[in-house]
Amino acid sequence: MAHELIYMDNSATSPVDEEVLKEMLPYFNEKFGNASTLYRLGVDAKKALDKARQQVADLINADVDEITFTSGGTESDNMAIKGVALSEIQKATDKNPRNHIITTTIEHPAVLETCKFLEKFGFEVTYLPVDEDGLISLDDLENAIKESTILITIMHSNNEIGTIQPTKEIGEIARKHNVLFHSDAVQSAGKIPVDVKDQNIDILSLSGHKINGPKGIGAIYIKKGVRFEVFMHGGGQEKGLRSGTENMPGIVGLGKAAELARENLETRMQHNKEIRDALIEKVTSQIKDAYVNGSLEKRLPNNVHFRFSGIEGESLILRLDNEGIDGATGSACSTHDLKGSHVLAAIGVKPALSHGSLRLSIGPENSIDDVDYIVASIKKVVDYLRELSPLWDNETDEYIGDRFEKPLEDEDIDRY
Ligand SMILES: *Cc1c(COP(=O)(O)O)cnc(C)c1O
């Protein structure tokens, strides 16, 4: 009875593309050289390393020597924020402590936890709020900048609700005030145009496994001339910026995934948008009390995020799995605890409603032909769960959870 698996959780992770895998395989055994050695095996590895670096640079319009390989998005985010913080704090004076960082309330935990960590060491962090669409206000940003501000770290697009921030304008403000701008572009790179030059980005994070590359590999772009403290010390690989013997299969895989993402960007965006818009149109018209979280216009083409009143996301996910559909509630990172999503709280979704959310993230292997089956399955499961729900009145077919709802507290917004 189970349908063939329809995987729609590509923002959590994505399958390695066949072509990517093919490029990677020889680097496990046949071409196993260490890129720091001088014999042919090592020279071949060095060539592959240079090629992959160029492929990643091309994806975001960076120069090749501005790309450093890391173990993924989490490491790139840590390296970016701590690298700038440790560099700037050395220039602190009595008059200017150079310790202020600006970010948002909806960042990925890799950014939020790093900022919280730095607060323990005397750094001061401003967490900018977002509006109901999930967008920051540029005025808020500019007003938050002060003499001691060293870094603005704002994600390119959000991993849960898919909102795309006004990156170019953020970068302009950062430049005007002589503050560095880091952007976590893990969800944007390979999905929408990312251009570090045009968008005024000084430091950027990206990751392999979100773009049909392998897990455990990522990259950081650091604009030439940016003062930066090294975070991983050792043998001096990656021009001393990130020591450790290079993960060659991963690097070659990330390079190929970046190349494919760049070559197919327009087609994939079109493909994703078509499926996204069909899902949004059909679900909101066929299911009662179904809403879309996040901006409809400034939204990743591959992100759909629904909220259904009266049900619980966890039950929805498990029952959809039985129908052969893999999606997510909140974000994959927040399924470890039962707290609501910090992103949904930040856009003003009350906890009970936030629990009834569903993220479907589209990848190249999804098909428009599956949309009707997906919508019918969601409707079937939502109807079933509402029938059992104490928050849903079956007589009147209405949500009655409001009666039990507490107002949203500040502490709900700051948590994740
Ligand atoms: C997945 C993700 C990360 C973490 O990347 P990993 O490669 O899994 O460490 C960071 N930021 C965002 C926005 C993400 O979606």
Image (cartoon, grey):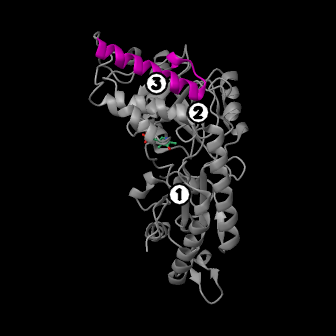
Q: Residue at x 56, y 59 (%)?
A: 409
Q: Earlier in the sequence, mark 3 or mark 1?
A: 3
How many angstroms separate mark 3 from mark 2 (CA)? 13 Å
Residue 109: horizontal and vertical position, in percent? 46, 44
How many angstroms separate mark 2 from mark 1 (CA)? 39 Å
Q: Left or right: where does residue 95 sit relative to residue 287?
A: left
Determine whether the residue tagged by mark 1 lies in a helix, strand or loop. helix
Q: Residues within 10 Å of mark 3 (few under 14, many from 20)?
A: many
Q: Is residue 26 visible?
A: yes
Name the residue carrying label 1: 412
> Would you say the beta carbon of the disc 3 residue lies within 8 angstroms of ligand 1?
no
Q: Left or right: where does residue 296 sit relative to residue 201?
A: right
Label 2 sits on what residue type?
Answer: Arg
Specify start and end residues of the magenta stretch as a single range: 40-66
In which quarter of the view is residue 202 placed?
Answer: top right
Determine whether the residue tagged by mark 2 lies in a helix, strand or loop. helix
In which quarter of the view is residue 374 placed?
Answer: bottom right
Q: What label sits on residue 262 in the rendered view?
A: 2
Measured along the vertical axis of the image, is residue 126 above or below residue 364? above
Q: Residue at x 59, y 72 (%)?
A: 376
Q: What label sits on residue 312 in the rendered view?
A: none
Name the residue carrying label 3: 52
Looking at the magenta stretch, what is its main secondary structure?
Answer: helix
